[in-house]
Image (cartoon, rainbow, N blue to C red):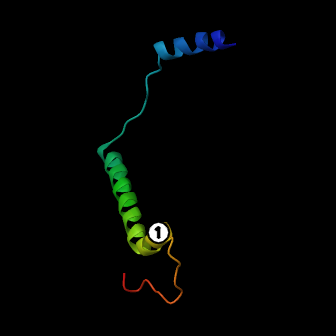
């Protein structure tokens, strides 16, 4: 079974079809903006919830009277 799969895949790899695609600079810019936005989003989320995450990792009980308004 594996040998016929290899026989099918080898020609596909050796003779690839030409790609009819174009990536303009705007597409690259959009990708970079998305990556930066994701990194900043993770950073903001960590900043907002850091105290809760730290207390949970240290095994401290959470207090109900504590608010994150001062963060």
Identify the residue position indicated by label 1 in the image: 58
Residue 55 at x, y = what percent? 46, 73
Mark 1, residues whose alpha carbon is within 10 Å: few (<14), some, or many (≥20)? few
Q: Residue at x 59, y 12 (%)?
A: 6
Residue 58 at x, y = what percent? 46, 69
Is any part of residue 33 visible from this angle? yes
For this orientation, the residue located farthest to the right is 1
Q: Quadrant of residue 23?
A: top left
Q: Residue at x 35, y 52 (%)?
A: 30
Residue 8 at x, y = what percent? 60, 13
Q: Quadrant of residue 49?
A: bottom left
Between residues 44 and 35, which one lies in front from this camera angle?
44
State the SS at label 1: helix
Is any part of residue 15 visible from this angle? no
Residue 70, relative to residue 12: is it above or below?
A: below
Between residues 15 and 49, which one lies in front from this camera angle?
49
Q: Residue at x 41, y 86 (%)?
A: 69
**Left or right for 3, reference 17:** right
Between residues 60 and 33, which one lies in front from this camera angle?
60
Residue 3 at x, y = what percent? 64, 9
**Left or right for 62, reference 28:** right
Q: How many marks?
A: 1
């Amino acid at each position: 079974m594996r040998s016929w799969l290899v026989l099918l895949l080898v020609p596909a790899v050796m003779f690839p079809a030409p790609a009819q695609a174009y990536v303009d600079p705007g597409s690259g810019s959009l990708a970079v903006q998305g990556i930066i936005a994701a990194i900043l989003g993770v950073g903001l989320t960590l900043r907002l919830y850091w105290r809760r995450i730290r207390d949970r990792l240290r095994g401290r009980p959470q207090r109900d009277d504590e608010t994150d308004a001062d963060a």
